[in-house]
Structures are given as structure tokens and as C-alpha cells.
Image (cartoon, grey):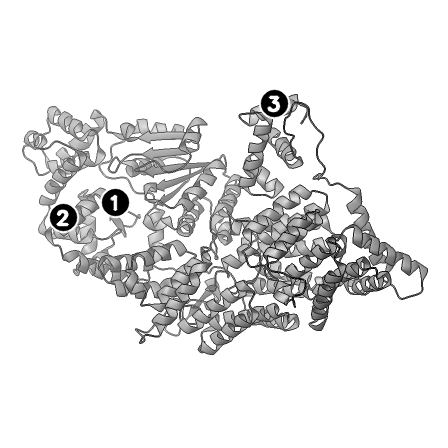
């Protein structure tokens, strides 16, 4: 099945179901839980269709007009501007921006990646998919190499993709030859697109040149680029036709019509149009039917809009009724083809008319080399639409209806929905949105597009359609507004109770659709919300209900429900059952012949294996997950970031700190690509403990602070990071803060602890020990330990057992404490556990010393000497090093009112080396905002206005060499 396409018996191409489950639950990923109910699948190859043809038209460099007037002085300006990196051609409509750039691009020597933008490109997923396709024209293979970063699942921003593009372009054999032209950039209003493009400009490789054509200044850092000499600008003043250029254009029109054009008429037209290209072109067209050029020239004056209206009227009046009607009726279309225009007008012969209109120079722009697609100049199209509405007020709705039908037949959802809405066919538009939702939202990651579709519908209509309400619920969830999902599910359930409407056939097929079964999807979504609360029983109940509601052939829904049941077993602490359930799901995915799809269930399986105390098995499963997701010749997909973090957690537990740091750094970097702008909680929490272990408490708190911001409020087994932060505070001696967290979380020593909240109760036990309350700690730990033993949760047995041994020692039961520690070590040593003991600090070191002494003194069966040596070495190393990241305070420097911290000294050293903020953030594994705060503190403490002054001052004070 090449390209993920199944072929039906009738030869129809439909996307393979195995390529349609495409997006993990982003909120869960953000928390780092790894409970992806919908595994992010690899995107299939696109089906060749009209959509591909239309994409090609967006990448096509427009052909020169027959009446093109060469403008060599502007071409020279553009050539010189390439040295700056960014060229901005900014002027109102009709100033010839596109014509100029297309002619320049075609005449130049550099390879050109051209992208004609439209309003749909405000969806960042579409924008960058199209931009990558454009760049692939000049760097063949680039799209394949960076394709995994486009999703699915689509990231919430595209910094990771842009970083990969930068690296690819910088490493290419022709790195000095790449030009990206973004035409009509004024149509882009998306802040996410602006931010990612600004990131590209900030880190632009030397061989990449960007050109933006826009009617208004884009919201980019133009002032900064201008100040650095990295911006060349051509504006309306430069784009105005000179008198000679205007004369050349006007005389071409006069020559065609045989009209004698006096010099005074040329001068008057050039002056009254102020060199405005659109006005001059319309004037040239109008002259073809004017026997008295001088009288014609004197007849108009005023603003551009007045001139445009006047000249357009003249041009239209010169056309035959057939051509005039064709122009008006096809003005409702953004792009034109013969077949489409036939369908819209209800008459044949449109291809010939389009070619005739192009030959006549009537503001029609060819979009390919084979005369298959055209578009009207934007100004001319606006005029035609206004005239159509004026002359035939009711005609536009029918034309839009015909266009919607054609686009629907050709599977171009965005255009079909737009025209259906314009026709006032809201129910039809709603059906189209429902049918295409799974493909657009899950497969292509175009949530912004889906939101735009829904926003165009009346609210009353949406409230009557359960599938649209579910679409809104999914959009809310993935945008982080989880609190709004429950009311939308209630509304969908209520709407579904009404009499059934039309049959539903999703474009992805019933097997690959989530919207295909409303009751089942509502149950799945309620089950997910229960997971977020840590409610195992509700999770299981809703998953069972979803399975009961699922019908034969609804494969995606049923598999998602089964995975929810596996998570429910996990939450119940029934880890063996959860392991079997996840393993079974892996076997099911393998049976599909799509091994890459097993990466996420393998990650989930590894998490359960770790909870079972089987670190070796977890490591093997992580490696299998990486292998399953690997694509030869491509970098790791961002969605495997958590797999690397899992490997880091195992390496950390085994005290392999260098490996742990390497895996954590890789995992965090990949997670930031997947969710730029957010903090990857799992990786940062692991990084925090690594820093704590090597003696960098400040760095540890910094990383854990970021992790805490990323994790949602509900703490528990599936979200241990709030508990991890409290535990770190406790390890650094802040007993009061840790105790306050346990109180705020509602944890009490006399509680009967449930497994989902086990991490918090383990913190509470540590707090009680730190508060010299060993009896209460021991009672709580006895309950935790007994529950873990009963359910064979060996990972919990080891951690609770180690703390229980410390509680016995604190209670004065030394012999029992030594025996308890020995029992735990017999479980922990074969799997290489170290940090679960070493992180408890001096009390555990002392108890370990007593155990070693007892083994030397007596014949009792003991812990293997190798294991004791590993543990003792971990404690010795921890005592020996304050850490390469130095948790100790730097020496006091005379002349500074407020001393720099160790981390600020690190940042200062990197500033002196000329590192950018982004490079510092990457090396320190922190966010860009964190680096900016450190730089601000450094400048403030040194009394410096900028980096250069700060470095100079630091050298004067001897802070840096």
C-alpha cells in the first residue's frame, strides 16, 4: 500500500486508516504523561488530485505579461538587496509588485522558491507545508527530510521545523543560492506565522534570501533589521512608473488600437495616475477603443479609486456581451479553470474565453505554464464583483452554489465550504465541515482552518449539530481550554438526542473517523477528562461505554477505547493487566504492517514496566519505540521526545548521569520542537534531578520550576511533577515549602492512600520524617508498602520500602531498619536502582553504612557486595563534588553591590563568547525567556546598557578572562 492508500473495488482512492490516526492528545503530551490515546501516525503521501494541481499554481512564478515594460533600475535595487537578506516590496494594490518580482525572479540566476499566499495560509500548518513545498523546488528532497516536523501531529508553533529548514539550507551544496519569495504577505494575520517567520529571519543562513511582497508593513522586527543593515525596502515611491515607463506602457496600448497618442496626453495620464501601474494599464486598455485620445485623457481625474472605477467602466463597455457576462459571473472565483468556469456559469467554452481574455490583457494572471489555471488581478476582481452585485443582486448566490458543488466533487474542502457559506447554504457547509473534519484536523493538523470554518456558521446551527459541537470540544481541548470541553460534550449529547439527520460519510472512511459515532466519541472524551482527574473508575466506565457504542468497522474509535481501558488499569494500580493491554495493542498495530505506529504504545508500555520495577525491560521497549519510529535519512521525529526522556529517567535511576543528561537534552530539544513555547515537563524534571545530583541546586530548581509550569493542576501517578518539585524543595532543605504543598494538595498522614496519588503521599512521608515525626511516617509508609506489595508494583515497593527503612531507623528500630533496607535492595539491585536510595541523602548513607557493617559482622544472607559498592560510590561522589555547574556561591567581587549567581556567571561567559540568546538557551537547556531574564539581571548588576558594556565591565572586575 504505497503512500498509505487503499484502493476500493471501484478504483476510488481513499486514505488508509493506518495513516489517519494522526494526533496525540497534546494536553497530555504537554504534561509529559505519555498516555497518548490517539497515537500520532506518520502522514501518508498525498493523493494526486486537483488539490495538488492547485498547490502547484501557488508555487508557480507568474509568467511575464505581453505588455511588460522592463524596469532595470528596480531590478538592480533588488539584486543589491539580496546582500541584506530580506527584501520588502511594500505598496498598495496595483503598484506592480508581483509583476516586478516575477520578471526579476525569472531573469535572475538564483533558484527561486515562489509562494503565492492566500487567506487560507493563515493556518500555520498550511503556511509551512506550502513554504516547504516551495523550497523543495530548489532543494529537492528537503520536504522529505523535514516532513516529520510538519506533523502529524501538527506542532503548536513551527520553531522546530524552521530550525531544521535553516540547518538543511545551510548544509546544502548550493548554500549560497536560495531565494524564497512570499507574495501577498499582507493576507497573513496569524501571529504564529509571523513569529515563526521572524525566527527564520533571526537565524537566517547566509545562503537564504527572503522577499516579501505586501500591501502593508508586516508585523516583523523591521526596525531592528533596518538598523542592522539586513533590510532592503522598495515602496510606492520607487514603484511608481517614471514618465518614460508610463509612456512606453501607454504607447503599447495605443499601437494596438492604432490611436495616435500625443506627448501631452502621455504626460497627463502619467501625472493623473501618479505612476500607478494599475491605472496606467487600464488607461492603455481603454485607449484601444478611443478615437479621441486627448479628450479621453481630459475626462478623468481624482483618486486612484475614482480612476479605477472610471477606467474599468471604459474597459468593460468595450467587451462583447459574452465576454462581459463571463467576466462578471466568474469574478466570484479566486482561481479560474475552463472546467470550473463551465460549471459555475452553466455554459461550455470557458477555456477558450479565458485564453481570449488573457490575450486581451484584461487583468487575468496565468498560474501555470499550460494555461490550465488563472486568477484575476485582485483590484479587477473586486470591481467585477461589485458590478455583478449592482447589476444582478441575486445571481452571485447561484454562482457560489455552483462553485461549491464543483469543489465538493473535486474534494477541495476549503473552497467548497467557502462558496457554500457565500451562497447562504449553511447546512450544506456544516455537512462539509463534518465530513472533512477528521482529515483536516487529525491528518493535516489544520486546526486553525477548522476553527475558521466553524466561525463562519451561525451559532444556532452549530448548537443543533452534535458533530460540530464535538469538533469545537476537540479544538478547545487541544488549545489548552480543557475547562470548556465538558459543557460542549453535554451540548453534543443533548443535540444527538434529537431526531437523526442526514447520513454521515467521513472522507477518511468510517474506520478512520472519530466523528463517525457521536455517542462513542462523547464517551471517549469523557473518559479522557476522567484520566486527567486521575479517576480510574470513570475512565474505565466511559471506555467500556465507548466500546459498547462502537459499531463494526469503526476501528479507530474502538482501538482508542481499548487504550483508555489500559490506562484505567494503570490508574487502578493493576500494572500487570495494564502491561498486557498495552502489549496487545502493540501486537494489533504490528499486524497492520505499519511498525512506525507502535512507537507510542511502546512508550506507554515502558512506563508501566518501570512502575513494575523492570528497568531492563523498559529500556528494551524504549529502544524498540525509537527503532519503530526511525526513518532512514531523517532526524528523529519530535514526537519521540518523551521516549528519549524515558531513557534518561532509567539512566538517571542507574546513576549513569552522563547518559541521562545526553538523553534528557535530546528529549527536551525534540519536545520543544513538538510544543514550542511550552515547557516539556518530563524532560525538565529529569534534568532537575541530574543537576541536583551533580551539585547544581539553583539549576535544578530552575528546571523544575519550568516543569511545574508545564504540568496541569491535578497531581498523581500520571502527572508526578508537582510532587517532584515538592520533593526537590525538601531535598534542598526547604521543609516548610514541601509541607505547605502537601497541605494545599489535601494530603494527610491518616489517609488511606490510593495509587493515583501515590507520588504525593511519598512526599508527605518524607516531610513527616524531616519534621521528626517517624511514627506517623511509618504508619503511612506501611499502608503504601502493603498496597504496592499486594499489587506487585515493584517500583513502588522499592521506593516505599526504602523510605520505610528510614522511618524504622528514625523510630529507633535499627535492626528492623537494616533488614528492611536489605529486603528492598534484593529487589532493586538486579535492575540497577541507585538514585532512589542516593537521593535520600545522609540518612540513607548512614543506614547503608550500618547494613554494610552488619553484613561484615554476621553470616546472615546479605546484599551482593557489588550492589553495595555501587550505592556507596554514589554517596561518596555526591559528597565529593559541589558540581561542575557549581551550586556553591561564587567569590565576592569588590565593586558589585549585588553579586552574580553561578548561573549568571555562566550566562556572562557565553555572552563574552558571542553566543546568541537562543544558543545560550540550547546549551543550558532552558527557555529563551529564562535566558533573557538572566541577561537582564547580568546587565543590571554590572550597570551595563548592552552586552558589549557588560563584557567590558566584567573583564575589568576580573569576572571573566
Q: CA distance from mark 1 to mark 2?
A: 20 Å
Question: Given this view, does label 3 or label 2 mark the residue nearer the observer?
Answer: 3
Q: Earlier in the sequence, mark 3 or mark 1?
A: 1
Residue 729, percent from left and from top: 67, 49
Callout 3: SS: helix
State the mark number for residue 784: none
Q: CA distance from mark 3 to mark 2?
A: 68 Å
State the mark number for residue 365: 1
Residue 755, percent from left and from top: 64, 67
Q: Quadrant of the C terminus?
A: top right
Q: Earlier in the sequence, mark 3 or mark 2?
A: 2
Whether residue 357 sits left or right of residue 824 in the image: it is left
The residue beneath circle 3 is 952
The residue beneath circle 2 is 387
* Residue shown at 44% from the left, 55% from the top: 479
Callout 1: SS: strand
Q: Toward the viewer: 922 or 827?
A: 827
Up the image or down, 9 lies above or below 916; here it is below
Q: Earlier in the sequence, mark 1 or mark 2?
A: 1
Residue 104, percent from left and from top: 34, 35
Q: Residues within 10 Å of mark 3 (few under 14, many from 20)?
A: some
Whether residue 804 sits left or right of residue 245 in the image: it is right
* Residue shown at 27% from the left, 27% from the top: 237
Amino acid at each position: 500500500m504505497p503512500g498509505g492508500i487503499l484502493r476500493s473495488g471501484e478504483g476510488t482512492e481513499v486514505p488508509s486508516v493506518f495513516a489517519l490516526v494522526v494526533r496525540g492528545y497534546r494536553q497530555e503530551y504537554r504534561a509529559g504523561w505519555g498516555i497518548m490515546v490517539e497515537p500520532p501516525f506518520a502522514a501518508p503521501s498525498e493523493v494526486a488530485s486537483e488539490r495538488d494541481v492547485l498547490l502547484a499554481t501557488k508555487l508557480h512564478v507568474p509568467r511575464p505579461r505581453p505588455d511588460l515594460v522592463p524596469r532595470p533600475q528596480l531590478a538592480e535595487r533588488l539584486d543589491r538587496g539580496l546582500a541584506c537578506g530580506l527584501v520588502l516590496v511594500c505598496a498598495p494594490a496595483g503598484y506592480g509588485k508581483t509583476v516586478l518580482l516575477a520578471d526579476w525572479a525569472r531573469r535572475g540566476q538564483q533558484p527561486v522558491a515562489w509562494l503565492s499566499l492566500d487567506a487560507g495560509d493563515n493556518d500555520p500548518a498550511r503556511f509551512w507545508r506550502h513554504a516547504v513545498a516551495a523550497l523543495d523546488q530548489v532543494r529537492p528532497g528537503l520536504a522529505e527530510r523535514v516532513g516529520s516536523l510538519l506533523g502529524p501531529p501538527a506542532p503548536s508553533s513551527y520553531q522546530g521545523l524552521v530550525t531544521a529548514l535553516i540547518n538543511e539550507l545551510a548544509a546544502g551544496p548550493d548554500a549560497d543560492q536560495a531565494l524564497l519569495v512570499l507574495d501577498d504577505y499582507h493576507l497573513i494575520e496569524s501571529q504564529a506565522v509571523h513569529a515563526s517567520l521572524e525566527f527564520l529571519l533571526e537565524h537566517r543562513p547566509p545562503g537564504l534570501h527572503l522577499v516579501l511582497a505586501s500591501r502593508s508593513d508586516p508585523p516583523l522586527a523591521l526596525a531592528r533589521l533596518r538598523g542592522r543593515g539586513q533590510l532592503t525596502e522598495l515602496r510606492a515611491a520607487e514603484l511608481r512608473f517614471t514618465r518614460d515607463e508610463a509612456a512606453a506602457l501607454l504607447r503599447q496600448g495605443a499601437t494596438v488600437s492604432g490611436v495616435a497618442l500625443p506627448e501631452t496626453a502621455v504626460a497627463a495620464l502619467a501625472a493623473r495616475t501618479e505612476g500607478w501601474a494599475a491605472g496606467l494599464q487600464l488607461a492603455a486598455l481603454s485607449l484601444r477603443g478611443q478615437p479621441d485620445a486627448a479628450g479621453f485623457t481630459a475626462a478623468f481625474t481624482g483618486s486612484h479609486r475614482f480612476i479605477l472605477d472610471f477606467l474599468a467602466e471604459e474597459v468593460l463597455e468595450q467587451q462583447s456581451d459574452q465576454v462581459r457576462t463571463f467576466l462578471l459571473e466568474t469574478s466570484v472565483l479566486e482561481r479560474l479553470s475552463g472546467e470550473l468556469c463551465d460549471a459555475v456559469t452553466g455554459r461550455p467554452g470557458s477555456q477558450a474565453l479565458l485564453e481570449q481574455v488573457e490575450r486581451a490583457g484584461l487583468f487575468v494572471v496565468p498560474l501555470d505554464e499550460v494555461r490550465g489555471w488563472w486568477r484575476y488581478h485582485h483590484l479587477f476582481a473586486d470591481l467585477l464583483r461589485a458590478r455583478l452585485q449592482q447589476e444582478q443582486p441575486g445571481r452571485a448566490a447561484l454562482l457560489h452554489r455552483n462553485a461549491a458543488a464543483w469543489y465538493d466533487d473535486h474534494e477541495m474542502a476549503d473552497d467548497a465550504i467557502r462558496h457554500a457559506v457565500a451562497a447562504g447554504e449553511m447546512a450544506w457547509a456544516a455537512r462539509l465541515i463534518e465530513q472533512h473534519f477528521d482529515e483536516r484536523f487529525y491528518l493535516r493538523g489544520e486546526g486553525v482552518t477548522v476553527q475558521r470554518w466553524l466561525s463562519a456558521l451561525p451559532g444556532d446551527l452549530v448548537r443543533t449539530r452534535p458533530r460540530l459541537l464535538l469538533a469545537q470540544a476537540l479544538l478547545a481541548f487541544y488549545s489548552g481550554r480543557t475547562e470548556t470541553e465538558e459543557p460542549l460534550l453535554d451540548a453534543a449529547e443533548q443535540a444527538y438526542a434529537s431526531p437523526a439527520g442526514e447520513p454521515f460519510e467521513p472522507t477518511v472512511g468510517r474506520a478512520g473517523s472519530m466523528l463517525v459515532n457521536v455517542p462513542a466519541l462523547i464517551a471517549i472524551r469523557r473518559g479522557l477528562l476522567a484520566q486527567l482527574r486521575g479517576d480510574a473508575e470513570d475512565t474505565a466506565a466511559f471506555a467500556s461505554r465507548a466500546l459498547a457504542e462502537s459499531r463494526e468497522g469503526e476501528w479507530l474509535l474502538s482501538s482508542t477505547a481499548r487504550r483508555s481501558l489500559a490506562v484505567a488499569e494503570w490508574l487502578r494500580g493493576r500494572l500487570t493487566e495494564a502491561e498486557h493491554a498495552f502489549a496487545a495493542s502493540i501486537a494489533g498495530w504490528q499486524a497492520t504492517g505499519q511498525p512506525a505506529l507502535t512507537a507510542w504504545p511502546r512508550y506507554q508500555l515502558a512506563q508501566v514496566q518501570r512502575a513494575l520495577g523492570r528497568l531492563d525491560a523498559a529500556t528494551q521497549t524504549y529502544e524498540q519505540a525509537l527503532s519503530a519510529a526511525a526513518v532512514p535519512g531523517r532526524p528523529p521525529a519530535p514526537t519521540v521526545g518523551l521516549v528519549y526522556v524515558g531513557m534518561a529517567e532509567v539512566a538517571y535511576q542507574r546513576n549513569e548521569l552522563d547518559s541521562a543528561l545526553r538523553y534528557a537534552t535530546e528529549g527536551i530539544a525534540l519536545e520543544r520542537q513538538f510544543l514550542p513555547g511550552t515547557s516539556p515537563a518530563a524532560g525538565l524534571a529529569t534534568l532537575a534531578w541530574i543537576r541536583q545530583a551533580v551539585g547544581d541546586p539553583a539549576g535544578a530548581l530552575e528546571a523544575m520550576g519550568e516543569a511545574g509550569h508545564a504540568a496541569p493542576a491535578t497531581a498523581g501517578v500520571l502527572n508526578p511533577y508537582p510532587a517532584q518539585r515538592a520533593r526537590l524543595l525538601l531535598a534542598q532543605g526547604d521543609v516548610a515549602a514541601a509541607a505547605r504543598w502537601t497541605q494545599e494538595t489535601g494530603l494527610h498522614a491518616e489517609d488511606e492512600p490510593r495509587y493515583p496519588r501515590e507520588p504525593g503521599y511519598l512526599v508527605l512521608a518524607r516531610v513527616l520524617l524531616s519534621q521528626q515525626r517517624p511514627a506517623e511516617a511509618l504508619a503511612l509508609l506501611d499502608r503504601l508498602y502493603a498496597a504496592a506489595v499486594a499489587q506487585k508494583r515493584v517500583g513502588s515497593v522499592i521506593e516505599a520500602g526504602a523510605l520505610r527503612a528510614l522511618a524504622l531507623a528514625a523510630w529507633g528500630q535499627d535492626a528492623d531498619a537494616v533488614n528492611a533496607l536489605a529486603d528492598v535492595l534484593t529487589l532493586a539491585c538486579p535492575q540497577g536502582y541507585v538514585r532512589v536510595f542516593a537521593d535520600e541523602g545522609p540518612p540513607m548513607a548512614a543506614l547503608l553504612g550500618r547494613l554494610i557493617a552488619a553484613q561484615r559482622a554476621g553470616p546472615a544472607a546479605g546484599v551482593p557486595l557489588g550492589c553495595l559498592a555501587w550505592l556507596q560510590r554514589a554517596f561518596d561522589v555526591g559528597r565529593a563534588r559541589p558540581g561542575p555547574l557549581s551550586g556553591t556561591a561564587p567569590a565576592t567581587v569588590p565593586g558589585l553591590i549585588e553579586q552574580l549567581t553561578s548561573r549568571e556567571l555562566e550566562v556572562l561567559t557565553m555572552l563574552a563568547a558571542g553566543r546568541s540568546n537562543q544558543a545560550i538557551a540550547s546549551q543550558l537547556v532552558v527557555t529563551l525567556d529564562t535566558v533573557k531574564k538572566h541577561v537582564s539581571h547580568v546587565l543590571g548588576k554590572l550597570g551595563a546598557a548592552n552586552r558589549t558594556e557588560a563584557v567590558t565591565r566584567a573583564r575589568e572586575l576580573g569576572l571573566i578572562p
